[in-house]
Amino acid sequence: MEATVDISTVLRYGLITLGLFALIYAIAVLTPWMAKHVDAWIAKYRENHNPKRDRSYGVRSIYELPPEKEEPEASAEEQQDTRKKGTE
């Protein structure tokens, strides 16, 4: 019994193996680069983040009540109008 292997089969499996190694190498090289960009994005996000809304980004239990909505504060003109109405 003679075992023969065609050269195209050897080349195909060899190239597939080299392709997998190249993919692993590319992932290993690109991971620190991507991490640097993600860290910069997170730092920028934290600078622009409103600390009053910290709770809105957290995970809640299904048994927790939803947070109460805060009503926007009235402008100075509206406050003066309400004061005038109260004195009349």
Image (tube, rainbow, N blue to C red):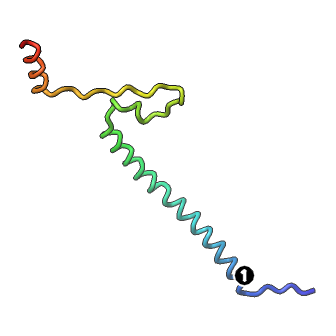
| Residue 47 horizontal/vertical position (percent) | 31, 39
Q: Which of 52 and 61 is in front in this view?
A: 61
Provide the secondary structure element on which disc 1 rests.
helix
Q: In which quarter of the image is the C terminus?
A: top left
Count of numbered circles in the view: 1
> Could you tell me which residue is drawn at 48 percent across and 60 percent down?
30
Q: In which quarter of the image is residue 6?
A: bottom right
Q: As displayed, is residue 67 above or below residue 84?
A: below
User: Observer-nearest residue: 48 or 80?
Assistant: 80
Residue 40 spot, x, y in % from top left? 37, 48
Residue found at the far front of this picture: 88
Q: Which residue is drawn at 10% across and 27% down?
A: 77
From the viewer's side, name the closer residue of 78 and 32. 78
Q: In this rendering, would 77 be left or right of 71?
A: left
Q: Which residue is drawn at 35% across and 32% down?
A: 53
Image point (49%, 34%), residue name: 59
Please rate how many residues cluster around mark 1, counting C-alpha atoms within 10 Å: few if below 14, some from 14 to 19, many from 20.
few
**Residue 67 against residue 14 in the figure, above or below:** above
Extreme top residue here?
87
Q: In the picture provided, is 37 more to the left or to the right than 81?
A: right
70 is higher (above) or lower (below) than 3: above
Q: Which amino acid does label 1 sit on?
A: Val
Q: Which one is nearer the viewer's eye here, 86 or 51?
A: 86
Which quadrant holds the N terminus?
Answer: bottom right
Q: Determine the image quadrant of residue 14.
A: bottom right
Q: Mark 1 points at which residue?
A: 10
Residue 81: x and y in percent read 9, 22
- In which image quadrant can residue 78 be found? top left
